C-alpha cells in the first residue's frame, strides 16, 4: 500500500501508536508528562501499551506537576496512580510563576509561593526544587530532565484543536511534526494525540473501559468546560462561578487566597457586555484599551495580534471582501478576544452580526 494512502486511511488511534513507537526508536529516554487530565491519561495508557508490546519491563517515568490549585478529585486520581507502584513516579511541587485573569487584566502570581499561605500543605513526598527560587516555565523542562542521560522525549497530551497556538506548533514541519523543541537542549516535547478531538478522547475511554478522572463527569453535569487546569487561567476564569457549585470547599479556599476572583465572578459578564466603555470604537481605541488594561509586556503581545487582524481585514476589504463579513475581523469580535487577555493569534469570525455592525456605526 502506498505510504500516502496508508496515512489517509489510518485512524487517529493507530497513528498515535505509530508516533509513540517511533518516539521509542529515536530517543534514549521516554517520559510522560501527566496532569491527571483526560488527554494526558490517554497518552499514559498508550505509552503503557507500546511498552508492553515491546517487552519493556522497567518502570515508566511519569512526571506530575502539582500546581497547588487542584481540586481533591484530581489529586485523588493522581494519588491512586502514584501509589499503584507500577511507575517511576516523580511528583513535583515547585514555586513557579503563573498568571491569573481578573476582569480583563492578567496578573502574575506564584504557585506554592513561600511568601503566602497555601491552599493545602505541600506533600512531603514532593520534589520541591530550590526553596529559595521561583521557577519560570522556560526552566522547567531542564529541571524535569535532571539525572536523565541522553535525549529525552517528554510526551504531552496536547491537542491541536484546543487553540490556534497548539495547532501552529504541529504545523511547522512536514515530517515528525509532533516532535517539538523545548527549552532544554536534550529534551523534545512529543504530542502523539495532536490530531485527536475531545470526542476521540472519550470514544477511547468508552471502547477500552479504562479509568479517567471523575471530575469530568461532574463537570459535564455541571454544564462547564471539561478541563483540569488551574481555575485562575484566562479560559478557566470565565466559568469561575461554576466552581462554587462543583467544589464549594475548594472555591472558598481559592477566594480566601485570591479575593479578587470574587470580582471576576461577579462582574465579568457585566463588563464583557460593555467592553469598550469610555473608548472610541476604533482600532486605535482598542490599542489604547489594551495599553490601559495590561502590563507593557502583555500589551505588546496582544497588540501584535490586533495588528495582524487589522492587516488581514484591510487586505480583504481592498480585494472586495466578497463574504461581506468585515474580512472576518469585526472590531467588536477583535475587542472581545483581546479583552479575554489572549496572547494568541485571533481567529477570524465566519459571520458578522447586527451587534458587530452597530459597534462600528455601520448598521
Image (tube, rainbow, N blue to C red):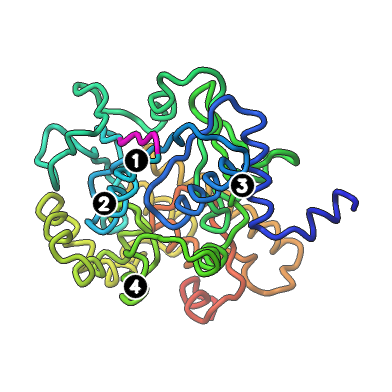
Q: Which residue is mark 1?
A: 85
How far apart marks 1 and 2 lie (CA) works out to: 17 Å
Local packing at callout 4 (Cα closer than 10 Å; few below 14, some 14-19, many 20+) is: few
Image depth: mark 1 or mark 2 in front? 1
* Residue 54 seen from this side: yes
**Which is nearer the eye, 276 or 237?**
237
Instruction: Find residue 273 and name its label.
Output: 4
Local packing at callout 2 (Cα closer than 10 Å; few below 14, some 14-19, many 20+) is: some
How far apart marks 3 and 1 lie (CA) works out to: 37 Å
Say which element carries label 1.
Answer: loop
Image depth: mark 1 or mark 4 in front? 1
Say which element carries label 2.
Answer: helix
How far apart marks 2 and 4 lie (CA) works out to: 36 Å
Query: Of all residues shown, which one is farthest toward the right?
Result: 2
User: Sequence order check: which comes first, mark 3 or mark 2?
Assistant: 2
Image depth: mark 2 or mark 4 in front? 2
Q: Which residue is mark 3?
A: 168
Q: Residue at x 14, y 56 (%)?
A: 255
Q: Which residue is mark 2?
A: 75
- What is the span of residues highlighted in magenta in the rendered image? 87-91
**Which is nearer the eye, 356 or 226?**
226
Check contact, mark 3 vs mark 1: CB within 8 A.
no
Amino acid at each position: 500500500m502506498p505510504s500516502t494512502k496508508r496515512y489517509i486511511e489510518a485512524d487517529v488511534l493507530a497513528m498515535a501508536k505509530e508516533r509513540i513507537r517511533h518516539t521509542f526508536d529515536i530517543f534514549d529516554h521516554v517520559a510522560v508528562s501527566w496532569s491527571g487530565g483526560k488527554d494526558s491519561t490517554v497518552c499514559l495508557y498508550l505509552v503503557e501499551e507500546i511498552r508492553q508490546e515491546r517487552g519493556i519491563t522497567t518502570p515508566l517515568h511519569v512526571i506530575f506537576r502539582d500546581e497547588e490549585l487542584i481540586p481533591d478529585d484530581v489529586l485523588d486520581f493522581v494519588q491512586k496512580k502514584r501509589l499503584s507502584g507500577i511507575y517511576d513516579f516523580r511528583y513535583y511541587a515547585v514555586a513557579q510563576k503563573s498568571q491569573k485573569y481578573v476582569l480583563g487584566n492578567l496578573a502574575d502570581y506564584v504557585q506554592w509561593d513561600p511568601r503566602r499561605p497555601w491552599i493545602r500543605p505541600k506533600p512531603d513526598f514532593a520534589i520541591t526544587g530550590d526553596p529559595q527560587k521561583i521557577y519560570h516555565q522556560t526552566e522547567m523542562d531542564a529541571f524535569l530532565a535532571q539525572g536523565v542521560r541522553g535525549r529525552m522525549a517528554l510526551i504531552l497530551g496536547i491537542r491541536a484543536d484546543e487553540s490556534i497556538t497548539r495547532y501552529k506548533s504541529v504545523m511547522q514541519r512536514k515530517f515528525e511534526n509532533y516532535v517539538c523543541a523545548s527549552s532544554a537542549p536534550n529534551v523534545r516535547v512529543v504530542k502523539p494525540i495532536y490530531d485527536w478531538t475531545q470526542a476521540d478522547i472519550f470514544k477511547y475511554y468508552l471502547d477500552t473501559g479504562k479509568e479517567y478522572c471523575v471530575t469530568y463527569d461532574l463537570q459535564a453535569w455541571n454544564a462547564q468546560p471539561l478541563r483540569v487546569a488551574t481555575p485562575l487561567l484566562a479560559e478557566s476564569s470565565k466559568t469561575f462561578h461554576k466552581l462554587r457549585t462543583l467544589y464549594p470547599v475548594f472555591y472558598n479556599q481559592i477566594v480566601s487566597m485570591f479575593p479578587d476572583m470574587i470580582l471576576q465572578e461577579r462582574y465579568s459578564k457585566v463588563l464583557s457586555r460593555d467592553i469598550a466603555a469610555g473608548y472610541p470604537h476604533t482600532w486605535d481605541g482598542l490599542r489604547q484599551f489594551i495599553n490601559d488594561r495590561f502590563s507593557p509586556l502583555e500589551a505588546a503581545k496582544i497588540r501584535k495580534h490586533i495588528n495582524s487582524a487589522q492587516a488581514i481585514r484591510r487586505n480583504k476589504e481592498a480585494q472586495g471582501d466578497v463574504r461581506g463579513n468585515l474580512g472576518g475581523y469585526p472590531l467588536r469580535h477583535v475587542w472581545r478576544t483581546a479583552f479575554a487577555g489572549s496572547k494568541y493569534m485571533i481567529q477570524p469570525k465566519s459571520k458578522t452580526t447586527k451587534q458587530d455592525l452597530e459597534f462600528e456605526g455601520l448598521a
